[in-house]
Amino acid sequence: MVRPRMASRTGRKPMKNTLAKRNFILVQGPPGTGKSYTGVKMAQILAQFRGEVMDEQLQSSFTRLATLDTQVRAANNRLASAKVLYGTAQQKLQELKQRKETLQKAKMTRDPIYERCQRELEAARKERDQWAAVCAKYNKTRDSLTTARNNRQTELQQDRAQCTRDFGPIVVVTYKNHSLDEFLLDILAWLEARRTGPSSLEGIVRIGSRSKS
């Protein structure tokens, strides 16, 4: 039964307590007593409560996913830096190979300059190989973190879907179509006002004759 205080601020606390204790609530009253208003507020409270519980249950998953995102970005940065250094070493190696060929064509293989070029060439080759190994290591780490991140994302989606199934839908039944439409319009306006934040109401399904709204 809808009483005047139920639609006021002082009536919201007992309404919340009722929602927490009962799985089924019957709202009845003469026109103008606030049945639709009370019903909309009940749906909002249930949706907010469901969202808070889902956030609490999924907090660890969100935290782990955020950590993996950070680790993947860091791995990508390390890999990018290593690739730059590998490219520099590779370019230096090519320049030394060209210098060696030039000295060979000039028949300066017994010159100290040629021997120094040989030593520098060998050092450059080792440096290039070292950076190649570092790139391979960083690439493997990045791929492993990316796989773990994608798996965590899939698990989070599955957990979120399971939470939604556990709570179930909010079912609203009215005797007249216009009452249902008024209720849904108020809910839609509330959802529109919450566009900037997450909402636990993922969709609305209306069953009935054609709406004139």
Image (cartoon, grey):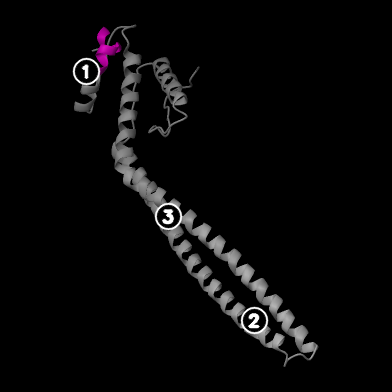
- Residue type for callout 1: Pro
Residue 191, relative to residue 107: is it above or below?
above
Q: Which residue bears the numbered disc 3? A: 149
Q: Position of residue 170 (x, y in %)?
A: 33, 29
Q: Badge 1: how crowded within 10 Å, few (<14), some, or many (20+)? A: few
20 vs 137, left or right, is left
Dot 3, how many residues are within 10 Å of its Cα: few (below 14), some (14-19), or many (20+)?
Answer: many
Q: Is residue 74 above or below residue 4?
A: below
Dot 1 lies on which element? helix
Q: Which mark is residue 14?
A: 1
Q: Which residues are magenta?
A: 2-13
Between 178 and 7, which is closer to the camera in this rendering? 7
Query: Foreground: 49 or 78?
Result: 78
Residue ranking furthest to the right: 106
Which residue appears farthest toward the left when viewing the image? Answer: 21
Q: Is residue 22 visible?
A: no
Name the residue rendered at 66%, 76% in the picture: 93
Give how far across and how far down residue 187 sits, in percent: 41, 22
Residue 112 in which image quadrant: bottom right
- Which residue type does callout 2 highlight? Leu
For discs 1 and 2, the disc positioned in front in the rendered view: 2
| Distance CA(mark 3)–CA(mark 1) | 44 Å
- N-terminal of the pair, mark 3 or mark 2, is 2
Query: Earlier along the polypeptide chain: callout 3 or callout 1?
Result: 1
The answer to which quarter of the image holds residue 57 is top left
